[in-house]
Image (tube, rainbow, N blue to C red):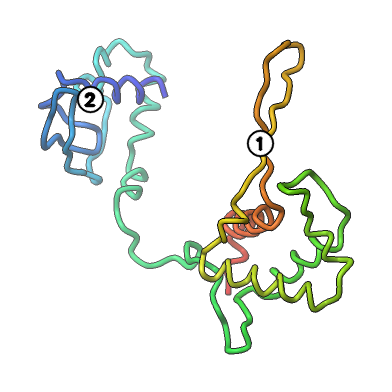
Amino acid sequence: MIATGAHHNHWMSPSAASESCAFADVIEVGNLGPRGVKLKPDRRVTNKDIASLIKNGNTLPKDIKNSFVAAHGKHTAHLFSEPNEDKKEFFYPFFMQNEDGEVNMEEFLKESFLKAISGIPGKARHGGFQMAVLGRFGKRWQKVLFQLIKLMLIMRYVPPDLKKISRFPIPKPGRVGEYRPISLCHDVYYFLNEIVTTITMQCKYFLF
């Protein structure tokens, strides 16, 4: 990190206009530094390049030099190049599966929804609304919200009212007169975020 930071600071300075980044060449330079580059993802960095890439690079300890070279090795080039084939793990997982309105991963979504409405009210939420309240209503009410949640996930759209938050100042312990803000979001909005986060963090749910 030390070497990479030094390299970045040096390359972004106006004096480095004619010099090269580890993975890019300068195309255009302005008063504040480079503002046009051409990526060179196949370029390899060696210990010999450190002197030209980092100001006073030769004075860096050997372990930092080796770490810098390792951080700019062959595997880093993949970050700048397109994949050879599409990966299902990166597909958006929610879409309409049939004319009956079932969404992909219907069972996972339904299980999470039933868990949310059958528990006891938890942390504070915007407007005091808790999804657990629906557990006391009939199945017709539960079905309506479940269908709306599926539509929001499919269309990637959240109504403005569900994006509203409540913000409260909380006193800082031991600091008189100082506060930190805490924001409370809508419980349905929180549920949507929890579902999407769970799916994107666990690739096994992408195997459909």
Quadrant containing the C terminus in the rendered view: bottom right
Q: Residue at x 51, y 69 (%)?
A: 155
**Amino acid type at mark 1:** Arg
The quarter of the picture where residue 195 lies is bottom right
Q: How many marks?
A: 2
Q: Which residue is mark 1?
A: 167
The quarter of the picture where residue 101 lies is bottom right
> Separation of disc 1 and disc 2 at Cα?
42 Å
164 vs 70, left or right, is: right
Q: Residues within 10 Å of mark 1 (few under 14, many from 20)?
A: few
- Say which label, 1 or 2, has the lower sequence index: 2
Q: Residue furthest bottom?
A: 99
Q: Is residue 93 above or below residue 66?
A: below
**Amino acid type at mark 2:** Trp
Mark 1 vs 2: CB contact within 8 A: no
Q: Is residue 14 above or below residue 165?
A: above
Q: Residue at x 14, y 18 (%)?
A: 15
**Toward the viewer: 179 or 115?**
179
Q: Nearer the viewer, mark 1 or mark 2?
A: 1
Q: Residues within 10 Å of mark 2 (few under 14, many from 20)?
A: many
158 vs 41, left or right, is: right
Quadrant containing the N terminus in the rendered view: top left
Q: Is residue 165 above or below residue 153?
A: above
Residue 93 position in % (x across, y down): 54, 68
Q: Which residue is mark 2?
A: 11
Q: Residue at x 33, y 30 (%)?
A: 69
Q: SS for tag 1?
A: strand
76 vs 92, left or right, is: left
Residue 186 position in % (x across, y down): 68, 51
**Toward the viewer: 156 or 128?**
128
Residue 95 position in % (x across, y down): 54, 75
